[in-house]
Image: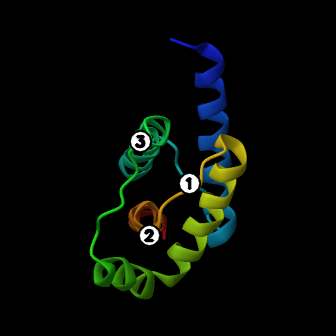
């Protein structure tokens, strides 16, 4: 509906993809399946943010395991979370950052 919202989300997604590229020193194929999946995740994340329904009930050991197993992706996800907070005025829950970490790790692994 709102074209300005669409432009804003497109800009945020482009900025997020740039963060992943810079973090890993890679060039992302924005037409790949893994990047398409990542963008879809981001769109659903934006919907959860706008509806105040972020993920928040994952067991702590799962979130901790994700952070430990994918430490580079977790650091990247926290940078992305900071951008989202600045651009969308919404902090992300630890669970959302953990889920984002998995998606970042997948995109990076598919390019490497």
Residue depicted at 34% across the width and 85% down the height = 65
Residue picked out by circle 1 = 28
Q: Please identify, in this view, whether the residue under mark 1 or under mark 2 is nearer the observer.
A: 2
Q: Residue 60, how many percent across, how many down?
A: 33, 80
The residue identified by callout 3 is 48
Q: Quadrant of residue 12?
A: top right
Q: Upstream in the sequence, badge 2 or badge 3?
A: 3
Circle 2 is placed at which residue position? 105
Q: Which tag is nearer the camera, tag 2 or tag 3?
A: 3
Examine the rendered structure and indicate whether residue 71 appears above or below residue 3.
below
Q: Whole-percent x and y of residue 72? A: 55, 80
- For the residues marked 1 and 2, what is the alpha-carbon distance in whole angstroms? 13 Å
Instruction: Reply above or below: 23 against 96.
Output: below
**Alpha carbon of mark 2 to alpha carbon of mark 3: how far?**
21 Å
Residue at image location 44% in from the left, 81% down from the top: 67
Q: Nearer the viewer, residue 80 or 26?
A: 80
Residues tagged 2 and 3 counted as in contact (Cβ below 8 A): no
Colouring style: rainbow
Secondary structure, mark 3, is: helix
Label 3 crowd bin: few (<14), some (14–19), many (20+), radius 10 Å: some
Task: Say which of marks 3 and 1 sits in front.
Answer: 3
Alpha carbon of mark 3 to alpha carbon of mark 1: how far? Answer: 25 Å
Question: Could you tell which of marks 1 and 2 lies nearer the N-terminus?
Answer: 1
Rendered residue at 52%/49% (across/down): 29
Task: Check disc 2: other Cα within 10 Å, few if <14, some if 14-19, many if 20+.
Answer: some
Q: Secondary structure at mark 2?
A: helix
1 to 66, vertically: above or below: above
- The reply to whether callout 1 and callout 2 are in contact (CB within 8 Å) is no
- The quarter of the picture where residue 98 lies is bottom left
- Classed neighbour count for the residue bearing mark 1: other residues with Cα under 10 Å, few (<14), some (14–19), many (≥20): some
């Amino acid at each position: 509906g709102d074209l300005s919202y669409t432009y804003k989300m497109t800009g945020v997604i482009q900025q997020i993809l740039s963060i992943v590229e810079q973090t890993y020193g890679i060039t992302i194929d924005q037409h790949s399946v893994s990047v398409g999946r990542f963008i879809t995740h981001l769109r659903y994340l934006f919907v959860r943010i706008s509806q105040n329904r972020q993920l928040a009930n994952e067991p702590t050991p799962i979130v901790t395991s994700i952070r430990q197993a994918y430490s580079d992706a977790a650091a990247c996800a926290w940078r992305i979370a900071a951008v989202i907070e600045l651009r969308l005025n919404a902090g992300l829950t630890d669970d959302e950052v953990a889920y984002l970490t998995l998606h970042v790790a997948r995109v990076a692994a598919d390019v490497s």
